[in-house]
Each structure stands twice: as structure tokens, then as C-alpha cells.
Amino acid sequence: MNGRERLWRAGYSLAWLPALPLALGYLLWRSRRQPAYRRHLGERFGRYAALAGAPSPIWLHLVSVGETRGAEPLVRALVAAHPGVPLLITHMTPTGRETSQALYPEAQRVYLPYDHPWLVRRFLRHFRPRVGLIMETELWPNLIHGCAQSGVPVAIVNARLSERSLRKGSRFSALIGPALRRLDLLIAQTPGDAQRLAALGRPADAVTGNLKFDVVPDARLAGQGQGWRTALGPAPVVMLASSRDGEEALVLDAWRQTAPAATGPADGARLCVVPRHPQRFEAVAALLADDTRPARRSAGWQPEDAALLLGDSMGEMAAYYALADVVIMGGSLLPFGGQNLIEACAAGVPVILGPHTHNFAQVSELALEAGAAVRVPDAAAAVEAARALLADPDRLQRMRGAAESFAAAHRGATARTLRALRPVIGADP
């Protein structure tokens, strides 16, 4: 470690000392709306329940819901390839942790501590992982340095880096560059991601594609969504999926302005809103109720004759996609960077994208080229495009087929990733 890196990392570590009480205050503030933020607080500071002689686990870091769901093919493959080896999953958000509990009940899950050297050492001493696999974009300098000192090999898998993130990372190259170079393995999603990572100081060791293409829609949930559709009646459904703050109001306003004169759901399409974050369910319910009382998933889709639907549950996206005819992708109408559209395409649902998809840039462009998605400039145009698709059954069916073909054509990243991981994880850890 050269003097410049040592100086930068020392300053970074010192900055964490006043930040830790602020982080605790932030968790307590968030817990007012989401009580789960008050649970397991000690884990954020490296305090964990005692483990009596537990063997060293394979450790995966999955920050939140998107990474947790996207890693499912890799997790299943690791469990199958390494039977009997315990699995440790770390998160940063309660929703990620809850999703992990539903998907991987066989694993142990905890919060990753904040990135101060002392807390990192406590985490590593406690769990003694045999290898660490970090999903997508999380790069904590002290964590990577601590793993190197402790002899824990670390790989970043399914790595992605947008142009925006490259610009931000370049401002802290004295911290980010050494952390990247200290990785034992770097596996990028696409050649573009590999090129941007190299610009930060570390060429990728492999380019394997996006693991999220290998996520197969849950048949049970898909059947559940089809059951909802039968119970709710024949009216088509436009879904605003994984919506973020501010987007619901824009789409709802456009929806009201383009609604037909008839008022019953059988006379026109229904709008189903599925917010990204559960702490916003009640606020979105109140917004929808300004027009008419929405049918809520948490209330068994009552009232049955509602023209607006609220998907206020977690872990059921596959069911919501099975319910929908067209998806407007949340996170893309305002500058949030978009959300994962692969799951919708795999379910055969055409996707309407707004202008902001920088977090899923290449996937979005590929979907557009394949005819699985269309791009619009704003929420009003998104609603107009959705209604136009519903009015053109032949085009809607073509886009359904294109979506399914697009998702199927890009599968195979899991097998390629497992092969690339052999140098750090071995054939049988």
C-alpha cells in the first residue's frame, strides 16, 4: 500500500467516526415509518449472535431487494455445487433481508457492518468466511482491505458500472482504484461495464452476462397472478411496476385525463400500482383514494369493482407480472435510473420505459432493439403508449413474444459465472 493510498484510507476511516452516530440516528429516523430498521442494530456495528463452532461459510453480499432477487440463480447453483457448505448472506436494507428470508430460508443472514476497519475486523473474525462474493456494484475500501489482510478471497460478480457512476468514482480514484485492484476476481456483466471498470483501475477477469436473465418466473406466483386476473374480471391491466416517489402522481394524473367516459372496470383498463418500497404503501394508497377507493392486495383485492389496484405486498412481483398486460417501468419516469425490466420480459409482458434508465442502460437498449420495450419521454406519453398497445391486440401480442424471446436469448450467465469463480471458490470448497 503506497503512501497516497494509506493517507486517503486513513482519512476515509477517520470520517466514519463522526458518521457512525449519524448513521444510528438515520436508522432510528427511518424506523418511524419502517420499524424493521430498529431491529438487529448491533449487526450494523459488528455485533453478532455467538456461533458455536460453525464452519466457514460462502458469503454473499446482496445489498437490497434487487440484488437479492437477481442473485437467485447463482445462489441455487452454489448450493447445488457445494452441498453441506453453509451460506451467509449480508444485506444493508430490511427489505433485502426480508426478501432473502423468503427466497433462501436455508441461509444465515445478517447486516454487513459499516465500513470502519474495527467493525470490518469484528465481522471477519466472527464469521471467518472462506470466500466473499459481492453482487454488482458494492465496493467498500476498508472491507476489501480487511479481507485481503485476513486471507479471505473476494470476487465481485455481475458487476455493472454506468457512465454516471464512473464519473463519480473517478473523483475518488485514490480509494476506489486500490480497492478494485485488491479484488481476487472481477466478473463484469457486459463489455461496456468491463471497459468502464478498467478506466477506474481494474480490468475485468471475465464478462459473463447478466445473472438476472437466468431468474425463472416462479410458477406458483405466476399461477397466483393468473388467479387474481380471473377473479378481478376481464378488464386489461396496466401496471406501474416498482414505482418511486413522485412517479405515481404523474401516472395517475395522466391516467385520469385519458380515462374513457365509462366508470366501471369492465368498460376500460385498470391501473395497478406496485410501489418499490413498502414504507410508501400507505402514502400511495392515500394518493389513489383521492380518485376512488383502490382495491388493495393486502385486503384481498377489495373492493372488487375498483378501477385502481394497489399491489401493497413484497415478494410477489412474478404474480403482479402475470396479472398485467402492459408494464410501465418505475424508476425510469423520474431520474432514479430505472428498475430491472428483465423479470417483466421473462413473464412475456411488454415494457414501457421512461427516459431515465442509466442503471440498466444496456439491458434497456437491448430490449428496445428486440421490440420487447418502447421508450417514451414522460409519464403522460407512457400512459398514452400503454392505452395504444391495449387498443392494438396484434401489436400487443407481437411485443409479448418479443419480450419472452429477448429474455430467453440472454440466459446462461450463471454457468459462465460459476466457471469464472473456480479460481477463488474451487470445485468443492
Image (cartoon, rainbow, N blue to C red):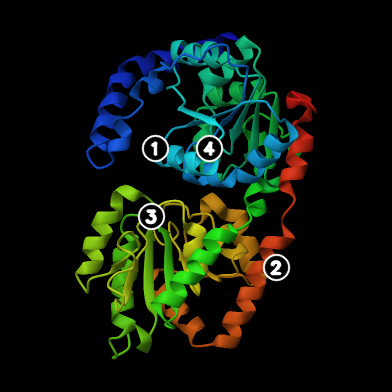
Q: Earlier in the sequence, mark 3 or mark 1?
A: 1
Q: Spatial distance from mark 1 to mark 4, Cα to Cα? A: 15 Å
Q: Amino acid at mark 4?
A: Pro
Q: Position of residue 239 (x, y in %)?
A: 43, 68
Q: Spatial distance from mark 3 to mark 1, Cα to Cα? A: 14 Å
Q: Position of residue 385 (x, y in %)?
A: 47, 78
Q: Nearer the viewer, mark 4 or mark 2?
A: 4
Q: Nearer the viewer, mark 1 or mark 4?
A: 4
Secondary structure found at label 4: loop
Q: Position of residue 378 (x, y in %)?
A: 40, 68
Marks 3 and 2 in Cβ contact (< 8 Å)? no
Q: Spatial distance from mark 1 to mark 2, Cα to Cα? A: 34 Å
Q: Label 2, on which residue? A: 405
Residue 213 relative to residue 229: left or right = right
Q: Label 4, on which residue? A: 105
Q: Which one is nearer the viewer's eye here, 181 or 20?
A: 20
Disc tally is 4
Q: Label 1, on which residue? A: 94
Q: Amino acid at mark 2?
A: Ser
* Residue 376 shows up from this direction: no
Q: Spatial distance from mark 4 to mark 2, Cα to Cα? A: 32 Å
Q: Nearer the viewer, mark 3 or mark 1?
A: 3
Q: Earlier in the sequence, mark 4 or mark 2?
A: 4
Q: Which one is nearer the viewer's eye here, 53 or 249?
A: 53
Q: Which one is nearer the viewer's eye here, 64 or 103?
A: 103
